[in-house]
Amino acid sequence: MAAVAIAGASLTARPAGVQFSRVSLAFGDRDILKNVSLNLASGSRACLTGANGSGKTTFLKIIAGELEADSGDAALQKGTRISYLPQSGVVHKGKSLYAEAEGAFAHIHNIIARAEEIGGILESHKSAGAATEALVEEQHRLLEQVENSGYFRREAAIETVLCGLGFSPGDFQRDTSEFSGGWQMRIALARILLEAPDILLLDEPTNYLDIEARNWLESWLKTFPGGCLLVSHDRYFLDATINEVYELFQGDLKRYAGNYSSYEKVRKIELESLVKRYKEQQAEIVKTEALIRRFRYKASKAAFAQELIKRLEKMERIEIPESLKKISITFPPPPHSGRVALSLEGICKGYGERQVIDGLDLQLDAGERLVVAGPNGAGKTTLLRIIAGADADFSGSIKYGAGINAGYFSQDAAEALQGGEQVIEFLEAGASLDLIPRLRDMLGAFLFRGDDVYKSVSVLSGGEKSRLALLKMLLKPMNLLVLDEPTNHLDLNSKDILLDTLLRFTGTIIFVSHDRSFMEALSTKTLELSPGDASHAGNARLFYGNYAYYLDRLQSDGLAEPADAKPDAVPAGGGLAKPAQEKRLLDKQRQSHLRKLEKREAELLKTIEGLEADKAQAEAALTQSDVYTNGEKTKAVKLTLANLATAIEEKSTDWELLAAELEEARRER
């Protein structure tokens, strides 16, 4: 049978899959799954989505065989192998990184042993026969399976996968116990990919990956011939890897064809009627409860009140996804600062013989949003620690602008959170009085809902501490935010809320993220860091545009072009290599474009104002006796009104589009 190459190994192209029918599971009186059905086959590219706590991880565990459902049927095609990557909690020790990765091929050892056993039996057979032929056929099938598994090419496969996920060859002989929690999950992911199963179940596989490892995994999945079911909160990653979405909502599972963005568009339209019915029901509930309060203590109306109570109890409550319950949170406004927020001059930082940052010069004006990009080990977190004042072991100088008050978020700070106080108490201790009434909404936006707010800080998981530390920092009035991976452990809805909040923030932001859509939407400038080694220092290049612009420049300029040949470069030790006149020209072009947009906006608003005046005049005409008593005149005026209404609607739509373009142009200025 034909074999398909993947990451240096290969997988036999044979039919494989798993089918679940009428699966149900309840925890107490809560239905997690209600008669759900799912079919995963070779080539499937599916995403499992739903609100936080809807049961996505639970369902993955059922598919993986780690959890038993209350009822339902499961059918696996013969020989189908399933591999499951949990969100967290995997710890490796006692083996080198390379040996742990090689363990992915352990199941092949059993096949080889059986083939060798058959070989021994055949040696003792002195004559041919049906039994001998059967053994020969079995041995041939087993040896073909070993060949197609990539076992004899495993060294190349292991190196490809480990390096793709961010490990260096120097890590291969390190004991796995030396790696931190995030790297432990990368080890687990590497092993699962090397297993080359028929069905991959990946629960938040990108949580601990930087942008380079994430891009590599995206490419790997595109060539993987087996089936894959993903849970992820990275919209861009999902759009690039899946072609169908399964949504878990109130225990029901529904399939949507297309990528994640297509699902969101379809679901938005689909949910409009649900939201309408939800609002109508909420209004009815409020009205009914008011009647109950009014009549329940009046003897003559007691029976009527009891009927209303029964009606409410029997009412099937309409629920809407958390993502539709839009929460707009507002943090303290940033204090006023000078025009320049931050200046770096000759920043140098090394570890031993390795110079990570060498002579970096950088200036940021107030209100700019800089994303720091680059591969793992390039010094992104190091630079943020220097800027935030968490690392004083460097040379060069940092000058903060007048009135700058900085806040710093990092995963290390989150992990250090301890204490026996409740989550809500922890936040109240650092919040101003005017924010305290809104803390519950803010906690809800960061996935602390219901009784979660009464949890002790000391018992929170790493992800919960991360979200709490980020929220705590944002409660303080600051005008410079230094954020290292702020979107880790947030779901898509929470990311959207955070992004909306940061876009409305008028201060300066410097951040590192591995969420591409978040990086593109928030950034206005991009600083690329390239790793150095013992023989040469790392490079830095500044791009005068957001992350999408940066990627376009890389593509148009060619990835192999040296950093110092690029007009946007900030080479190590040399300050800004981009000619000042080029920057002035770019600024001039942006100003010119902005003025044209503002002129078009003024003209459009003037047109709309004129149309509104004409409409008001026509409406006034309808009240005149010589018009409303004359059928022909009335008909003509109404036709004019209809035409004016259409024109106003069209011009208003044009203005909304122009306003969005204008806002983007002002952000880029």
Image (cartoon, helix red, strand yellow):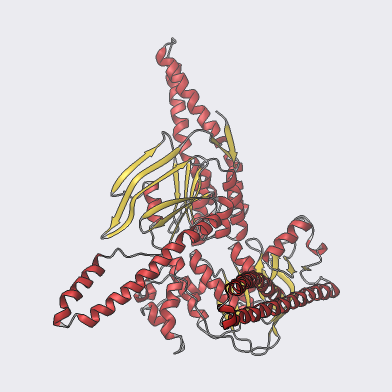
At horizontal 13% and vertical 81% (from top left) the residue drawn is 299
* Viewer-side residue, 309 vs 517: 309
x and y, in percent, of residue 487 in the image: 53, 68
Q: Position of residue 196 (x, y in %)?
A: 51, 42
Q: Quadrant of residue 409?
A: bottom right
Question: Residue at position x 62%, y 61% from top?
Answer: 376
Residue 559 in view in this figure: yes
Vertical placement of residue 160 versus 458, above or below: above
Hey, which quadrant is residue 443 in on the image? bottom left
Would you say residue 346 is visible in this rendering? no
Residue 394 in the image, given as x and y percentages of width and height: 67, 76
Query: x%, y% of residue 396?
Result: 72, 79
Residue 636 versus residue 475: which sits nearer the camera? 636
Q: Residue furthest left?
A: 299
**Residue placed most toward the observer, 540 or 312:** 312
609 in relation to 142, above or below: below
Residue 277: quadrant of the picture:
bottom left
Q: Is residue 304 left or right of residue 78?
A: left
Q: Which quadrant holds the C terminus?
A: bottom right
Which quadrant holds the N terminus? top right
Position of residue 308 in the picture relative to residue 39 (left or right): left
